[in-house]
Image: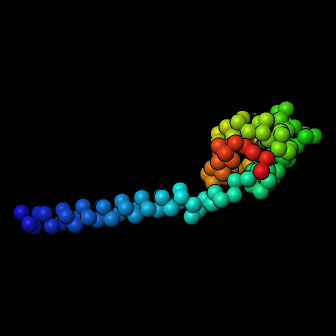
Amino acid sequence: MLGFMRPTLIYISLITILCNSCTNNNKQTLLGSICDTTDTKFSTFVNPLITSQCLSCHSNSLASGGISLEGYDNVKAHYTSSLMAIKAGTMPSGAPPLDYCAIKKIEIWIQKGANNN
Ligand code: HEC
């Protein structure tokens, strides 16, 4: 009986330890050691991101697809469709999709009221 129990117990403890370390790693990743969500302001995060990733096609003068994302009023008018396009990976067109953290920070800016802050 003991000869059978001992390896089983060790095996179960090992699995428990391994599972715990997985969980902790995931939590760290989700809780900010990688995604720093301190700054989700329009002026210091959202607008610079849109300027570098979107304005090459969505400036006032080009307005690809009839959409300008230049300046707060235009971004505010199109943030719902923009977030959808970003999450679907269709925008920015012809470039790698935005990463998880950037998307998360845009979502937080919207949840807080999409303010001109
Ligand atoms: C290389 C050019 C280019 C870049 C960069 C670009 N877009 Fe677009 N975008 C287009 C074109 C062309 C269309 C219209 C045709 C289409 O829908 O593909 C469009 C359409 C859209 C639309 C309306 C259609 C839809 O999918 O809902 C939204 C919203 C949009 N873009 C948002 C963005 C955002 C936000 C960014 C930056 C993260 C961005 N785009 C970057 C070219 C671009």
Q: Is residue 8 above or below residue 99?
A: below
Left/right of residue 83 with respect to residue 21 in the rendered view:
right
Q: Residue furthest left?
A: 1
Left/right of residue 102 with respect to residue 5 in the rendered view:
right
Q: Position of residue 49 (x, y in %)?
A: 76, 52
- Whether residue 53 is visible: no
Residue occupying the point 86% across, 44% down:
70
- Whether residue 39 is visible: yes
View quadrant of ligand 1: top right
Left/right of residue 59 with respect to residue 17 in the rendered view:
right
Q: Position of residue 107 (x, y in %)?
A: 65, 45
67, 88: nearer the viewer: 67
Q: Position of residue 109 (x, y in %)?
A: 69, 47
Quarter of image, res 77 = top right
Residue occupying the point 18% across, 62% down:
8
Q: Residue furthest right?
A: 61
Q: Position of residue 61 (x, y in %)?
A: 93, 40
Quarter of image, res 45 = bottom right
The number of discs equals: 0
Which quadrant would the N terminus be assigned to in this image?
Answer: bottom left
Residue occupying the point 77% across, 57% down:
44
40, 87: nearer the viewer: 40
Residue occupying the point 19% across, 64% down:
9
Indicate the colouring scheme: rainbow
26, 107: nearer the viewer: 107
Left/right of residue 72 with respect to residue 33 in the rendered view:
right
